[in-house]
Structure formats: structure tokens, C-alpha cells
Image (spheres, coloured by chain):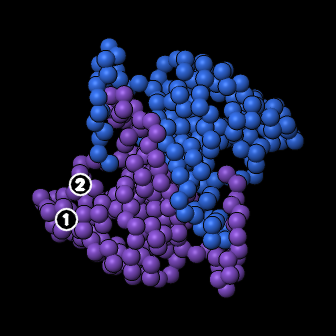
Chain colours: A blue, B purple
Amino acid sequence: MPQGEPLTVPDDGLTTKQRRNRPLLMVNTGDGKGKSTSAFGLALRGWNQGWDIGVFQFVKSAKWRIGEQTVLERLGELHTQTGEGGPVEWHKMGSGWSWSRKQGTETDHEAEAAEGWGEVKRRLAEQKHTLYVLDEFTYLMERGWVDVDDVVTTLRDRPGHQHVMITGRRAHPALREIADLVTEMQHEKHPFDRGQKGQRGIEW
Amino acid sequence: MPQGEPLTVPDDGLTTKQRRNRPLLMVNTGDGKGKSTSAFGLALRGWNQGWDIGVFQFVKSAKWRIGEQTVLERLGELHTQTGEGGPVEWHKMGSGWSWSRKQGTETDHEAEAAEGWGEVKRRLAEQKHTLYVLDEFTYLMERGWVDVDDVVTTLRDRPGHQHVMITGRRAHPALREIADLVTEMQHEKHPFDRGQKGQRGIEW
């Protein structure tokens, strides 16, 4: 993995170091596999740098617990026990966010999604985390469950040094516009095409 | 992350369970970011399932130690200490593979790459690992450092239940042909375009 060299040096008045350390807004989109896996891989990398990691899974089913949650929460415990890496918080919607009093009750997905975004906004304002993974967040924008202008303004104007990684198909053009890094993961071939179902360790 | 449902059920004489548990050959290719990050994310997921993970980094510089290596090796130690997850081996070329007597000496990259592939072949024959990550392996095929037919035959006819994930740009057509899953990661926007260099935690 060679260290990237810039193609051009921009006339933005910043030093190379300032430019290097600029906080990034990253988007993994497209129909292909690897959007979330890559985002959690980035969280792993960040943990190793001692970053404070906050994962917010905007998915319907809270029953679904993926391997990355188990491992990243375990790494968060390791941090508490030994000081290695950084702290990790993992939150997901589905039957109420973990910080919510409504937890465990049947909830309205749209309201719950909006509540999740509200919490992310508060944390960004407080500069709570170094890296935010907003998994499957693009769908909220697509469905109008969050206000696109509010999302764009909040992310673009976030204070301090906070990285944000957003995953999901069909990323909104306004999100692509303000992002520093956009990867379109294209589906070329998948076992589902051949009638194979998802399997343990590969899909979750 | 919903569980995948197949689009069609193939007439291949296999039960759904047999089809589900078929070992996979996966390829992350394209110019975009996320090929290796996603492969190491998959290793994380596999570790959590108790899989035996073998990572082989076919990169020139052994000085480059990425966060994933530190974390996955730490998880391998955890397995030894507590039985959680699975064992992890991480090998990389650059100044001699860890199993080689030539380690630490200036080596010929082509010979070293071929030696790495020879070791992977032996391990596949012995069914040593559950998941092999062959990071940046596509370049060996592209440069003719390994024999394409040998790679195709070995991977296609590998015994038992061994998953293989290969990363790198410009995957060889013969590799795409035999792969079960191919994701093309397309570069849409990257900070390097704006003159930003790679940064700690994001690129390594």
C-alpha cells in the first residue's frame, strides 16, 4: 500500500501538513459488495491510531449483529483494559437506539432514523468522536427521512478534526459534491447471481 | 445488512445449504479506494467466526506496517490467550518472507513474489487456512511473475473449504472468470486529486 502522492499541488494557502491532516468526509456507494466492510476496516485502522470511533448503523433490524460489531466492541474493551488503540461505541437502530428511553419498543423507522441523525449532529457539535461511521445513511437522504440541506450543512461545517464515513447505495448528489473521497463499488459478479445465499463469515 | 436472497435458483444438483457453504474466490479490483480495507474487514468478520486467517501481502516495502496488521495480529494473540475468534498469520514480502531463510536480505522482488505464491500453493494443498487474503496479488499475474494457468488451476481446484480473497488493480480476465465474486471499486473522487497526501489512520 504505497503512500499516495498528489497529482497536483493546489493553490489553497495551506501547508502540505495542514492539507494532509484535513478531516475527511468519505462515501462508499454503488451496488457492489464491500461498502460497509471497507468502512469497518477503516474503523479498525483508526482504532489502531488511538482514534475515538463511533459507529451508527442506520439499519432496520437490530437482531442483525455483524461480526465487526463484536470485534470492534471487543477492541473498545481492550482499550479500557490496557490502553491499546482507542475507545469504540457502536449504536444501531431497529428497536430503539441504545441511548434512547424508547429502546426495545416497536418504533417508527422514520422517526428512529431522524433521532439517530439528531444524535450524530449533537456529537459532531461536541466533537465527540474522531471517526464516525454512518452505515447505510444514504437511504435516509434518499427517502427524505432527514433534510438534505441540514445534512450537507452539518457535515460541511463540522468543527475540529472529525472524519466521517458514509455508506449505502445511490449516494445523494449533494453528498457526493461535498465529499472528499467517493468510491463507487460496482457489482461485477456475485454468488447471489448463481442462486447462492449469503453465508456466515462472508456476509455477516 | 440484509441477508441476501438469490435472484434465481440454479439447476446444479446442490442443496441450498451446500450452495450456501461453497468456498468462495473473491476479487476486489478497480482503481478506487477500499480494495484492501474491505479484504481486511472480511478477515475481521472471519476471525469472529473462529476462522483460521492467513494474510499474504505481496507488496514491495516491508517497512510499511498497516494498522490492520497490528490489530489482526493482536486478535490472533487474543485467540491464543482466551480462545476467542480464530488464529491469524500475517506474512509480507519486501525483505524476505517470514518463513524464509533469506529474510532480511536484499531480495529480487520477482523471485520473492514467486516464492510467496509457492507457499500459498502448499498451504492450499494442506488446507491450512479458512480464509486467505492475497493482498495486491493481481500485479504478480499482470507482470508474469506467476504463471496465470498455474494460479487459475490451483485456485479453481483447491481442496476442502477454503475462501480466497485477492486484491489489486486490473485483475486478470482469467481470474475474474473463475471468481465467485468480483467487485470493481471505482475511483470517483479522492483527496489526492486536490493535492492532499495520504494520512495516518486513513491510508495506513
Q: Secondary structure at mark 1?
A: helix
Q: Residues within 10 Å of mark 2 (few under 14, many from 20)?
A: some
Q: Is residue B49 above or below residue A179?
A: below
Q: Secondary structure at mark 2?
A: loop
Q: Quadrant of residue B33?
A: top left
Residue A36 in percent (x, y) is at: 57, 47
Q: Is residue B65 above or below residue B168?
A: above
Q: Are marks 2 and 1 in contact (CB under 8 Å)?
A: no
Amino acid marked by disc 1: Glu
Left or right for A118, reference B138: right
Q: Which residue of the protein is positioned furthest toward the top in this rendering?
A: A13
Left or right for B135, reference A126: left
Residue A181 in percent (x, y) is at: 46, 35
- The reply to whether residue A194 is visible in this rendering is yes
Left or right for A122, reference B167: right
Judging depth in this view, the residue of A199 and B26 nearest the camera is: B26
Residue in view at x 55 percent, y 63 percent: A189
Residue in view at x 60 percent, y 55 percent: A67
Amino acid marked by disc 2: Lys
Q: Is residue B54 above or below residue B148?
A: above
Judging depth in this view, the residue of B39 and A70 nearest the camera is: B39
Chain ID of residue with mark 2: B
Q: Earlier in the sequence, mark 2 or mark 1?
A: 2
Chain ID of residue with mark 1: B
Q: Which residue is mark 1?
A: B110
Residue B90 in percent (x, y) is at: 36, 60
Residue in view at x 67 percent, y 67 percent: A197
Which label is found at residue B60? 2
Q: Which residue of the protein is positioned furthest toward the bottom in this rendering?
A: B13
Q: Which residue of the protein is positioned furthest toward the right in this rendering?
A: A106
Number of residue marks: 2
